[in-house]
Each structure stands twice: as C-alpha cells, then as structure tokens.
Amino acid sequence: MKVQVLGPGCPKCGELTHRTEEALGELGLDTRVEKVTDLREIQAFGVMMTPALVVDGEVRFQGRVPSVNDIKKQLSVPHPTSRA
C-alpha cells in the first residue's frame, strides 16, 4: 500500500500526516506516509485544494483534515481496480 499526503507543508498538512500515521498504527499496517510538496506532482493528481490524502494513487480526501476514523475507513477500502 502506498500512502501519500499532498500539500506545501502547512500545519494542516502536518496534522493530516499525523492522523494518517495514527490510523495506520491502529490498523496494524506497517506503511510509511510519503509527503509530496512539489506543486507539479500535486497537480498531477488533479488536486485543487490541499491537504490531500492519496492511497495507492487514488485521492481519498482533499481540502480538509478528516478524523482518524474516517482515514481508517479509507485505508480499509480496496482500490476500485483491485479484485478480491
């Protein structure tokens, strides 16, 4: 699983990173959160508002800092192209 936080490094970006790391820990997932600060990379995801959370290349949240529980739900949702 690849988890990325997109944003320029603002306080909200830091909070999203912290909450995402907390959610990963609570789920027992040993996944590192990658911080993406380059504006071109952020725009390549189609994100217009930061911070944003990307899981396996799919934007799950943008423009707000969701709760740890909301993040956990999104980390548990399989990518639409994956089949069980």
Image (cartoon, grey):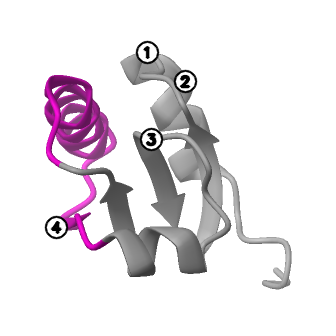
Residue that carries the numbered disc 3 in the rendered image: 50
Q: Magenta includes 37?
A: yes
Alpha-carbon span between mark 4 and mark 1: 19 Å
Q: Is residue 49 left or right of residue 84?
A: left
Residue 23, picture quadrant: top left
**Disc 2 or 3, which lies upstream in sequence?**
3
SS state under label 4: loop
Q: Is residue 74 left or right of residue 75?
A: right
Asked if the magenta segment contains residue 55, the reply would be no
Q: Who is closer to the viewer here, 46 or 56?
A: 46
**Amino acid found under the numbered disc labelled 2:** Asp
**Pointers 2 and 1 in contact (CB under 8 A)?**
yes
Is residue 81 visible to us here?
yes
Closer to viewer: mark 1 or mark 3: 3
Element under disc 2? helix
Q: Which mark is residue 67?
A: 1
For label 4, the residue is: 32
The N terminus appears in which quarter of the rendering? bottom left
**Pick the front one: 40 or 31:** 40
Q: Say which residue label 2 marks.
A: 70
Q: Which residue range is magenta in the image?
A: 9-38
Please name the amino acid that badge 3 sits on. Answer: Thr
Label 3 CA crowd tier, 10 Å (few <14, some 14–19, many 20+): many
Q: CA distance from mark 2 to mark 3?
A: 17 Å
Give the foreground label among 2 and 3. Answer: 3
